[in-house]
Amino acid sequence: MTSSTELATSSTERQKLPLSSLTAMVIGSMVGAGIFNLPGRFATATGPFGALIAWAIAGGGMYTLARVFQALAEKRPDIDNGVFAYAKAGFGDYVGFLSAFGYWIGSVLGNVFYWVLITATLGRFFPEIFGNGASVVAIIVSLVGVWAFHFMILRGVREATYINTIVTIAKMVPLILAVVLFVFLFKYSQFSENFFGGIGMPEKSLIAQVRDTMLITVFVFIGVEGASVYSRYATKRSDIGAAIIIGFVGVTGLMVAITLLPYAAAPRAAISGVANPSLAGALELAVGHWGAVMISIGVLVSVLGAFLAWTLIVAEVMFAAGQSKDMPRIFAAQNVNGVPAVALWVSNIVVSLFIISNYWSRDAFNLMLDMCSVTSLLPYLLVAAYGVQVARSGVGYEKAPDERGRDQIFAWIAAVYTIFMFIAAGLKYVLLMTVLFAPGTILYFWARREQDARMFTPVEFGIFATTLIAAAIGVYSLATGLITP
């Protein structure tokens, strides 16, 4: 009789993914909702000059982080599902749990945001039905969509990733067409007028302008680690790093073009005033209503594809944490198709609860976007810190010792970049993050009790106490109105 472990292993072997599928996972994860909101979010904050500085910082910072993921995939091939496993390997059980939970809850919030954007896009054409994405009908449609994907994924991971590859190709078409149209209609005089903000630019320093764009850049780059998360399915270990770099370079170029080219089509103030998804409104300013229709269709295809990719990743993170005993072992359960069924059920139930809560949110669109960005920063910071640790120790560099210095520099830059992102996000979002993390620690207690293991080391208890205090401040601030969701 075949054991459940053998069944899971053989199922994983059957579902090995080549470089093309891993690269599609990275592109599919990155090219989702955020790219369609870049023109409006940037135009609200700054002109092309500030945007160029912001992308230089964000692109440089995230490139170094991508290089850290690539280096760790090569130098520590024994660690699968790297996003949180690296944190555990470097900094202990509780920090590993916080990384896993942070990445998981951030991904959950991202999936909620996708459905807010889908229904908000439908609201452009049916405002009385879908409104801004938080109406009763919008919430019902979102819930139906979540559970339709849920039951499709339960049929098998390989089938879902093939669908993701097809959708990734399909959703690139309207984006590339939009870039071509903006290039064809490029007005140098308009771009020059907007360069430093143009007419109606709010009075604020260049530093403040750049800072106000930082969270959206984090959001659009989330997914660069998609191949690392799905490492146990890679046909060849070297494909993980290659997929990350290929996906990163291609998508970054596209995002910079989508941000800058609309400045040559209309005044900055006009772009900042369009409804979400702002790329649709920006293209409408340039070519007319048909442009908005084309992009809106692209939004629906793109976001549905991104939701598929991230539903896979959300469940995979919780499954891997269950396997490594960082979360209760129940999350490591798989069905006969090799899908982490319990993790998938729990994740989509939480997604559904957040979707329902949007009915009472003042600005569900930007709240979910920004919270997703902030909660993802902690896992990224811990990966960068572990990259520094590995490069300094020399583990895995026995055959390539000359690469240690280079990789350590990349890891240090990535760590500084993620700390800067926390500062740019502001205290509000950091406190809201701890409000989510504090009750999540119940899962850590559950897992440690199952293993009859010590809850905390002295350092870990200090981290836990700090999280609780910050969460208490966050709850008090929410209750008194000092922070508004």
Image (spheres, grey):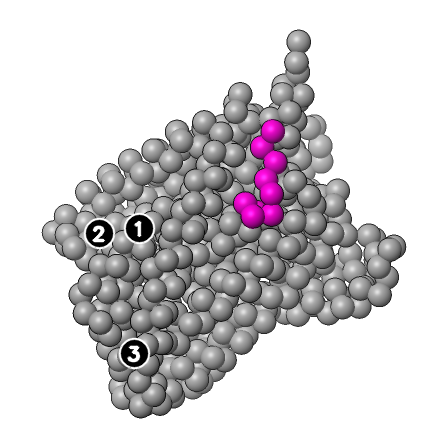
Q: Amino acid at mark 1?
A: Leu
Q: Where does the image place residue 72, in percent across and percent down from the top left? A: 71, 53
Of the pair 164 and 109, the residue shown nearer to us: 164
Contact between marks 1 and 2 (CB within 8 A): the answer is yes
The residue lying at 31 percent from left, 90 percent from top is: 189
The residue lying at 70 percent from left, 28 percent from top is: 452
Residue beneath label 3, please?
185
Q: Where does the image place residue 289, in percent across and percent down from the top left? A: 18, 65
Side (left or right) of 17 relative to 258: right
Q: Which residues are magenta?
A: 14-22
N-term mark: 3 or 2: 2
> Disc 3 versus disc 1: distance between alpha carbons?
25 Å
Q: Amino acid at mark 3?
A: Leu
> Disc 3 versus disc 2: distance between alpha carbons?
27 Å
Contact between marks 3 and 1 (CB within 8 A): the answer is no
Q: Amino acid at mark 2?
A: Leu
Residue beneath label 2, please?
122
Q: Is residue 15 magenta?
A: yes
- Residue 130 tag number: none
State which quarter of the image contains the N terminus: top right
- The image quarter containing residue 447 is top right
Side (left or right) of 324 relative to 314: right
Q: Is residue 205 visible?
A: yes
Residue beneath label 1, please?
300
The residue lying at 35 percent from left, 38 percent from top is: 146
Q: Of helix, strand and loop, which one carries label 3? A: loop
Q: Of helix, strand and loop, which one carries label 1? A: helix
Q: Where 367 sits versus 440, above or below?
A: below
Q: Of helix, strand and loop, which one carries label 2? A: helix
Q: Is residue 263 magenta?
A: no
Q: Where 453 sits versus 171, above or below?
A: above
N-term mark: 3 or 1: 3
